[in-house]
Each structure stands twice: as structure tokens, then as C-alpha cells.
Image (cartoon, grey):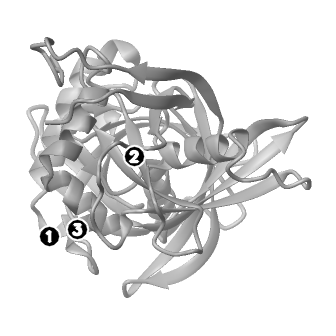
Amino acid sequence: MFQSDVRTVDYHTCGEPFRIVVRPPVRLRGATVAERRMFAISDATVDGLRRMLCFEPRGHADMYGGFLTRPDDDGAVLGVLFWHKDGFSTACGHGTMALGGWAVESGLVAADPGGVTEVPIDVPSGRVLARVHTAGGRVAKVEFVDVPSWAIAERVAVPTARGKVQADIAYGGAIYAQVAAATLGLTVEPGNLAELIAAGREIKWALNDSAHARHPGDERLSGVYGTILYDDLGTDPDGNPHQRNVTIFADGQVDRSPCGSGTASRVAMLSATGRLPDGGHLVHDSIVGSRFLARIERHVTADGRQAVVPVVTGTTHKTGEHLFVVDPADKLFPGFVLR
């Protein structure tokens, strides 16, 4: 089991935490970031470090972070292994935005004097891009340019404790089920959080082993990562779709932001169903009132599918730097979660 002091830099992206471990004091084996994720899942030392930084008392049940690692090749600035309370994820848009902001603010990547700095990052689902916009010497916003994303299935019947609902399923670096909260008798509000978590978990596990949850090119990317429960708020003054969502991912974890890779999957689905045209954007709000704007950058073919490359824009801010220590006499190490 891992036992060592660890330094982190913490950010939040539209309310969702991201704990950056710049120099993980563990060995991450594998030739690629995707291979290192599989190693991390199986290695007790690496997983012990995740638990220490994510679990209480150093974290909480909804904590999120990443271990920096080398990129797959010189085409990217860095690689990252994303983690949460239940393990290691394949994608993370809010984390990519935080890493882009950190890379520029820390000086790892020099800010382009033109005001837009590109930070390519290798993640388990492929190469993504943080496009960092600066003004007055500060990071003003970050665009997350995702891997090719596509709709998988529409109106899949899912039995729940609240009755049968229909789920759309799409890929945005991870696979998400998407369900209108109203069909569950709910709205996306903090007061309904317990019911939203229960419904999100139920839908995820009902679909996780289905044919709809299989990635066509890489089995490591299969499985339903999360459930996006959304309210349709109509359109903005320019006719763009406006929605509010909460994404319940992993096993009951709540995204405070509108969810980066989840928003990418919504872009893919709304494009496929004709609700998001080229040149338009999705106004995507979170359960805490923060907002992403998302659009289609281009159309591509990926893994034999017609796909889009989504761009998700949000804000990210540094919240602190930490030195986490381990007392050898601490019988609760590496920590615990109550949910």
C-alpha cells in the first residue's frame, strides 16, 4: 500500500474539482496512456495513491483528479490518468480544461501572445486539446476539443423503479446514457439530488452490459460511464438548445459542472437528431448553475461511424496547493467514503 507525502495543485472547472498530481510518487507502467490506465486499475500501489487523495478525510465521495504522466509521443505536452472514487476513467473534459489552465499558469506551456494557446493532452480515450484563452495575463476561458464523438442509440427502453423510461446513448470519450429528468418525475435541482443519484445509478447499471455500451474499436472504452439527466429549457434568444443537467457517473458520483465529456456526448446526440446544427451551440447548465457552451467543430468518420468533433467551453480556476501527509499510526489510511 502506498505511504508517502504527496503534493497536489487543485482546480475547479465550473464547480467540479480537479486535483492535479504533477509528479506521482509511483511507477506507471505501459507504453501508452491507455495501457497505463489498465496498469493503474490493477496495481495496488497506484490505486492506493488514488484512494488516499480521493477518499475522506483528504477528499470526499465526489472528488476527482489526475496523475500526470508522459504523453504517447511528442505531439502532446503531457498525458494524464483520470481518477474518481471508484477507479480510473477514460475521459474527462472538465479535467482537460483544468490541465490546460494549469499548463499555461504554471509556465509549462508559454502563453501565445495572440491570446489562444493550444495544449495537446493524451488521455485514455485518445488525444484531446485544451485551447486556452488568455486576456490581461490571466486565463479567461478554456475550450475542450474532444475526440470524435457519435450517437449510438436512440430511445432505448430502460425499466426503473419510477417506471420505464427511454434513454439515448452516445459516446464522447466515454459512453453516456441520456434521459429527460421529467420522464422520471424529477427536475434537475439540488433538492432532488438523492433521487437523481438513485435514478442515474439504476439507469447506468441497467445498460452497462448491453450491446449499446460496446465501443466498436477498443473494448477498454466499453461500458456506460454515466447517466446524464437533463431538463429541456427550450432555446436561447438565438434559437440554440438550452438544457440543464446533472451527470451521475462512476457509481453514484455527482458532477458539479455540466460535465465535459458528457456535454460532448450531448453534442453528438443533438447533432444526430437535428437539434444542433453546424454553427449553433448547446447552452448547457449544471445543477449548481454553472455553464458550458458547446458546438460542433467539424464532422469526421471514426471507428466506422459518422462522428463530430465537439468543442466545449468553460472556465477553470485554481483553488489551492496541498501537501498531503501520511501518519504511520493512522489506522484509517488510505481513507474511506460514506457513500
Q: What residue is shown with label 3?
A: 220
Report which quarter residue 157 is drawn in. Answer: bottom left
Kind of residue at disc 1: Ala
Can you say which quadrant of the picture contains the N terminus?
Answer: top left
Marks 3/2: CA–CA distance: 19 Å
Q: N-terminal of the two: label 2 or label 1?
A: 2
Q: What residue is shown with label 1?
A: 211
Q: Secondary structure at mark 1?
A: helix
Q: Looking at the picture, how far across and down is residue 69, in whole percent?
A: 43, 56
Kind of residue at disc 3: Arg
Q: Looking at the picture, how far across and down is residue 276, in whole percent?
A: 58, 60
Task: Report if the CB atoms under discs 1 and 3 are less than 8 Å apart.
Answer: no
Q: Looking at the picture, how far across and down is residue 255, in whole percent?
A: 39, 33
Q: N-terminal of the two: label 1 or label 3?
A: 1
Q: Looking at the picture, how far across and down is residue 270, in whole percent?
A: 49, 59
In the image, which is nearer the foreground, mark 2 or mark 1? 2
Left or right, residue 189 beside residue 109: left
